[in-house]
Image: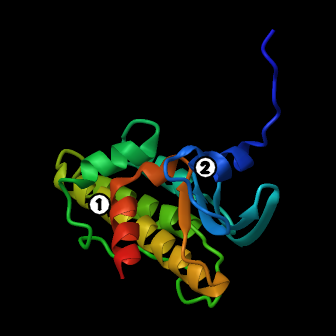
Amino acid sequence: GVPVVGVHHLEGHLLSPLLADPKPDFPFLALLVSGGHTQLIRVERWGSYQLVGDTLDDAAGEAFDKSAKLLGLAYPGGPAIAELAKFGDPQYFKLPRPMLKSNNLQMSFSGLKTAVLTIVKQHLTQGEAANPAWRAHLAASVQTAIVDTLVAKAAAALRQEKLNRLVVAGGVGANRLLREQLGEYAKQ
C-alpha cells in the first residue's frame, strides 16, 4: 500500500541537499563525488542539470578504495584512509594531481592509483611492511592529493559558471579534510 516513486540515483544525490534547513537556492554547482562518480554539475532547477566537469577514468572514491586495498585497509577505503592519515605527513610522498593545469574541468585519478601501487611495491620490496609509519604517510598523501584536486576543480567550476553556491553530494563528501578545505575556500 506504499507508493513507489522512481528517482534516478544521481538526481537523488544532487537534490538531497534540498532536504536540509536551510536548503540551497537554485542555481548551484554540485560536486557529486562517490565511489562511482566524480562530476561537477550545474543545477538550474528541478530536472535541469548540465554536466560541466567529469573524471576521464576513475572516480575519487574508487581511488580511495583501491589505495586502501593496496595498504591493506578495510572497505570502504575513504574512511579507512582518513583514519590512518591522521598519523601521517601529507607531504611525505609527492603524489600527482593530474589535470590541475588543464584549463578545463576534467579530472583523472588513475595515475594516482598507479603512483600508490608503485610506492607500495617499493616499500614491500625493501622489507618495510612491518613499519607502519610509511603507510600513514602514504594514506595522508593520498587523501591530500584527492582533496586538492577536488577543491581546485570545484573552485574553477564555480568561477567558470559564475555561481556562488556549492553542494557536495555522495559518500566522499563526508571526508573531513574535503569539508575543511571547501570551507576555507568558501571563507575566501
Return the residue at label 1.
Answer: 140
Toward which corner of the image does residue 2 lie, by quadrant? top right
Q: Secondary structure at mark 1?
A: helix
| 71 versus 88 height, above or below | above
Q: Earlier in the sequence, mark 2 or mark 1?
A: 2
Q: Position of residue 122 (x, y in %)?
A: 34, 62
Instruction: From the viewer's perspective, tell me whether residue 12 is left or right of residue 138.
Output: right
Hey, what amino acid is under mark 1?
Ala
Instruction: From the viewer's perspective, tell me whether residue 112 is left or right of residue 2.
Output: left
Toward which corner of the image does residue 140 lie, by quadrant? bottom left
Q: Position of residue 152 (x, y in %)?
A: 48, 78
User: Can you tell which mark lies on residue 18?
Assistant: 2
Q: Residues within 10 Å of mark 2 (few under 14, many from 20)?
A: few
Q: CA distance from mark 2 to mark 1?
A: 32 Å
* Residue 110 appears in the picture as rendered: yes
- Looking at this view, is 127 or 101 the one in front? 101
Hey, what amino acid is under mark 2?
Leu
Q: Residue at x 17, y 49 (%)?
A: 131
Q: Position of residue 143 (x, y in %)?
A: 37, 61
